[in-house]
Image: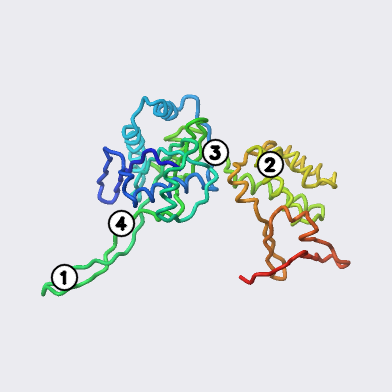
Amino acid sequence: MNINKAILHVFDFVSCVNVFAQAEMDLGNKTAKRYVTSQAKRAVGNLDSKRGTFAENSLFAEELRAYFRGERDFVGLSQQIGEFLVNELSRMEKTPSTDLLVIDFEGDLDQTVREMTDEEAEAAFKGRGTRYFAIILLEARQAYMHEVGSNDFGDAATTIARHHAILPNPSQKVASFALIDGDAMTVWFVDKEREIAGDTRWIIPDGLLQCSMEASSKEVLQAVTTVVEEVAEEYGANTAVALSKAKAYVAENAEESDEVDAHELGREVFADEPVLQERFDRAVSEGAIPERVVVEAAVAKRVTRNHKIRTDTGIELTFPAEYGENPDFIEFSSAADGRIQIALKNIGHIENR
């Protein structure tokens, strides 16, 4: 990940003082560079990101295209974004102080999100890939800190003070952000409904970006697994096997495409059960899930890697999804009384955790 440019604007709705930075952040500062890089990685790796498509008449899309063509300056564009957001947020009845972090960077959507060392931040900072433009709202939080001073007699004294403008930790989820692919102009965002001047609004997709709001890859996968489980349960099939097959299919498909054919998935999951295939196809046709499911490769790998089951006897098992249909490793069978039996095979070593 290569951070090309970053800027931070401060909106303090408690003191009613807003600071629009007039210069980019100094990324030679290790602390600033590490924080910015962590936030950029967190944006590209967010499983809850919804997809969006710019409206044909989106003014923001025009401005951003001009920026990528070199016709708009970074600082001016970020200030314009900040002015819009301040105007919207200031009309809320109770607005938390918020900083606006805008980043121009290059990176890879398949990133591992975690706390980084200085060395890892330096390596990530220099890495290259697809160019992105990120708009991140950092809501301030209250925190208590010690203060050191002296009393009236000159003795060293300490106290506890409350501070209102503490930035979120790099490891925390960001409540609202937008991420735009500079080449394809694809939009990903996370936002929440806000009550502004008596109306409920999504200020990032509806107000700022002027884009559509589609389900996140995580939401789509949850819908797919719900339908698979419901069909399997309806006909008495093993839900654990069906779900692990579905996850394994999505993960394998993600290697080649970010689109999954729902009907093909049903045929794969219920390969030897035409009645269940037909029932799954009917659920797709009825709109339970889209006929073509869009799932980001990075999300598919993280969400479908493992499958977890919990029995009514309190036993929990987590195993690679592709093992669900491989009897050499795990096998499900039914006893004469209808109870489920699980056999774990070819185990050479067990670790206690």
**Labels 1 & 3 near each other (Cβ < 8 A):** no
- Asked if residue 128 shows in the view, the reply is yes
Q: For mark 2, what is the residue?
A: 253
Earlier-in-chain disc, 4 versus 3: 3
Q: Quadrant of residue 20?
A: top left
Q: Earlier in the sequence, mark 2 or mark 1?
A: 1
Q: Find residue 124 and report its horizontal and vertical position in percent.
A: 45, 47
Give the residue number, with chain letter if any, for mark 1: 150
Q: Are marks 4 and 1 in contact (CB under 8 Å)?
A: no
The amino acid type, in three-letter code, at marker 3 is: Arg
Write down the quadrant of residue 309 in the picture: bottom right
Find numbered disc 3 in the image and state the secondary structure of the residue it sits on: strand
Q: CA distance from mark 4 to mark 1?
A: 23 Å
| Three-letter code, disc 2 | Asn
Residue at image location 69% in from the left, 59% down from the top: 319
Q: Nearer the viewer, residue 282 or 266?
A: 266
Label 2: state its secondary structure: helix
Going from the N terminus, do you reach mark 1 or mark 3 first?
Answer: 3
